[in-house]
Image (cartoon, rainbow, N blue to C red):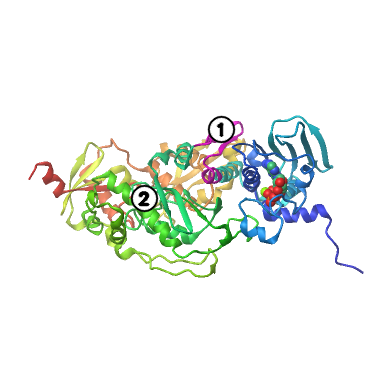
Amino acid sequence: MRTIQRLPLPLSNQIAAGEVIERPASVVKELLENSLDADARSIRIEVRDGGKNIRITDDGTGISPEDAPLAFERFATSKLKSFDDLYQLETMGFRGEALASIAAVARVDLTTRRRESEEGTKIRIDEGGMKISPCGCPEGTTIFVQDLFYGTPARLKFLKSPATENANIQDTVIALALANPTVGFSLTVQDREVLNTFGCRNLKDAACALFNEGKKLVFVEASDDLIRIEGLCSPPDLFRADRQKQWFFINGRWIRHPAIQKAAESCYLGQIPSNRFPFLILSLRLDPERLDVNVHPNKREVRMNTPQGLFSLVKEAVAQAIYSKKLLDGAEIRLEAEEKKFERPPLSDWRPERKKEIFENFSTSERLPERKFESFESFSAPDRLPERKNEKAENLPWEEMKLLGQLHKTYLLLEHPLGLYLIDQHNSHERVIFEDLAPAALERQELLLPIFLRLDALQMARLEEEKDLFFDLGFEIEKSENLEYLVRCAPAILPYSEIEGTIFELIGGEGGGMGQEERWRAQIACKAAIKAGETLSMERMGQLLARLKNCPQPLTCPHGRPTGFLLSLGELHRRVLR
Ligand code: ADP
Ligand code: MG
């Protein structure tokens, strides 16, 4: 008896789809890449039901009536004809798998018209198969993906809450918008517009349209015979507690690349607190022949023949961006110790021929060891950062500092061997609480009066999804009969009046991903911390300092803001013209 059977086509397509289409954000990525390959200038993305329904409309070339049905066949593509083409690729797609995969796991409507055709084409694919008809429609292509994963309940189960899936979609759109700043991207979620880049002139404009911090980012630019690097990065006074605002592109492809990331981050060593990360948007262009993009269906990993000097060029580009920003900014208040490490040449000395020397100066002992990359190397090759030796720079001469008092109910004033040290009472208390919320130190308070929460469906889903994390952070929240939730326990440090607001804030924010626990701890700390405007007794200030001193990173709050700063004696003397 035969036991080996060929899988029926729909089933094999569904299995293949699993590789390309993992979640709603993968649908969005594939469809957007198709629109970009079709030279769209403007793309509208509409999302409903946590990405189970997605409609993408572009003004690209459109598909001819003859080609339209082929588009849904597996390994049918207009972009690749021979194996050698794979190494000349200028398009995002080439496998011809995306539309087939999407149609295997959702109902799809496509309407499309090429400019030169009078009539458009409409295709509907569902359980009943494919229906094709002529139709009137604008130039370009609209694809409407409905009831994603309706036929594959196992996949449906793996979907996170709508809020999380929406956030993933948003990340994808942001990345593609940054890679294509001159194309207009608009994203609406349940009819609410969440972003729109309007097709900007350049990356900076696009970044400003996407982020509040956009204005502060500085230009990165460098090139040699083989590579061109362009992008934006944060000045040293702008940094984050996670790496969520970092994007790397090679030839327009959004990639993961730990080695490039580390090269870029190394420029910030000693400039921003450790465990803090810069905002980075780096776009590299190099000869497509050096890239092998055919590695993973999601194509976030690419293999490349790394040109010599790639990493030093990245470092040079970022260092120069930060450095010229510093020169322009003029005086900054920094710790005296750090000042010595970074000797700033006078402005007039900023001449190209001095560039090399300045960079030498710039990173001192914390330079990355030069490494030669000769061969075909996978991106995951670890490129280790040197250990930070000078951890002491992270701390203050606590024993020699004397508390003088409170200023404007906001700052603690301390005498410091090198001048006057000001500590922000809110930021520093935030740091202290953040450490108190660590699992080992966490204290819970049982609420005498439980708090009732009235949640909408989305909030409920998010709460259920994050139940474990809530518990780990000291909350006990249970469902009561009438669809309400009861908070029975909360972190001891959180004032009663802040509990409800904090929970709403946590479930309303961006979810999932790396560092979520840290983010939540930081948010709770912010709610629980002493605010500006509160009078503190000398005793309370003493307690705060004693606890701050013992924190592993006393110099910044968990969001990366400084807890304090030094007004040096030199500065004070200058003020009185001594
Ligand atoms: P690939 O992008 O790898 O070629 P897809 O399955 O994503 O494979 O798409 C199949 C083909 O359908 C593409 O090669 C392209 O010719 C056509 N196509 C898909 N989407 C669009 C679009 N938005 N505009 C124009 N043509 C499209
Ligand atoms: Mg494609």
Q: In front of the other: label 1 or label 2?
A: 2
User: Residue extending furthest left?
Assistant: 578
Q: Which residue is mark 2?
A: 321
Q: Amino acid at mark 2?
A: Ala
Depth check, front residue: 293 or 18: 293
Q: Is residue 27 magenta?
A: no
Depth check, front residue: 245 or 342: 342
Can residue 275 be spotted in the picture? no
Identified at 84% across, 56% down, the residue is 8
Query: Residue 436's spot in the image, x, y percent?
Result: 38, 52
Q: Is mark 1 within 8 Å of ligand 1?
A: no
Depth check, front residue: 155 or 442: 155
Which element is circle 2 on?
A: helix
Identified at 38% across, 59% down, the residue is 266
Query: Residue 463's spot in the image, x, y percent?
Result: 56, 43
Which element is circle 1 on?
A: strand
Look at the image and tell me in which quarter the N terminus lies.
bottom right
Look at the image and tell me in which quarter the C terminus lies.
top left
